[in-house]
Amino acid sequence: EVQLVESGGGLVKPGGSLRLSCAASGFTFSSYSMNWVRQAPGKGLEWVSSISSSSSYIYYADSVKGRFTISRDNAKNSLYLQMNSLRAEDTAVYYCARDIVLMSVWFDPWGQGTLVTVSS
Amino acid sequence: QSVLTQPPSASGTPGQRVTISCSGSSSNIGSNTVNWYQQLPGTAPKLLIYSNNQRPSGVPDRFSGSKSGTSASLAISGLQSEDEADYYCAAWDDSLNGLFGGGTKLTVL
């Protein structure tokens, strides 16, 4: 079964940092691009970042560019999101999602999400 | 405000057909494929339609998608109570950004 499990969410103060992880199983992780998508409480979905299978291509939303860094470790079947200089508006559930085709927003499946709360 | 525009709400009675629109521009829907996601309350989004009009295995054929120019639509026929959810369109933009519509909350009356 294809599965994605996020972890690392929690409460952090404004200006702080947090590192999210996404553990993949049930498929050849190194063959797929991966993504982070977030959803603020009661709001819609927002694409955050994409990384190609070999990390050669990386894209970020303008809202996180320069503060967030996406990375992956194909040997560990894991995706990461390093979040620095966090702001209240970064509060959201963060989902990792497998990309069927890079640069398509064709995501399947999605993880269950991890909640990040930025508050003093 | 999302670049891809969806109506915030839609509704229908059981058995009816409802459509949800998604309007974009030449740099996103006009030049890239559209995907649709269903998010049931309290759960992660699920792929519903990909490449404009293709259904993943397991998605009932009551769900269909279409695209014309810079707009796309999701149609749900034979509406059922379990279809009550939020629906999002999505497309890549040539500015190298992924885009989601603002979402449409579907209510089954």
Image: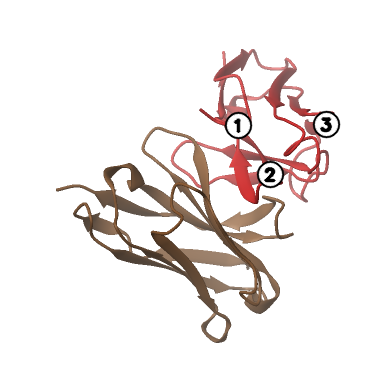
User: Which residue type carries mark 2?
Assistant: Asp
Residue bearing the label numbered 1? B3
A117 is higher (above) or lower (below) than A79:
above
Q: Are marks 1 and 2 in contact (CB under 8 Å)?
A: yes
Secondary structure beneath dot 1 equals loop
Distance Cα–Cα, label 1 vs label 2? 10 Å
Distance Cα–Cα, label 3 vs label 2? 16 Å
Subunit bearing disc 3? B
Residue bearing the label numbered 2? B93
**In x, y percent, where is residue B99?**
61, 41
B105 is higher (above) or lower (below) than A104:
above
User: Which residue type carries mark 1?
Assistant: Val
Secondary structure beneath dot 2 equals strand
- According to the colouring, which chain is brown? A
Q: Residues within 10 Å of mark 2 (few under 14, many from 20)?
A: many
Query: Image check: A51 left or right of B50?
Result: left
- According to the colouring, which chain is red? B
Query: Image check: A55 left or right of B91?
Result: left
First reached walking from the N terminus: tag 3 or tag 2: 3
First reached walking from the N terminus: tag 3 or tag 1: 1
**In x, y percent, where is residue A20?**
39, 65
Distance Cα–Cα, label 3 vs label 1? 16 Å
What mark, if any, has residue B67 been given in the picture?
3
User: Which residue type carries mark 3?
Assistant: Lys
Tell me the mark number nearer the camera, choosing from 3 and 2: 2
What mark, if any, has residue B98 been given in the picture?
none
Q: Are marks 3 and 2 in contact (CB under 8 Å)?
A: no
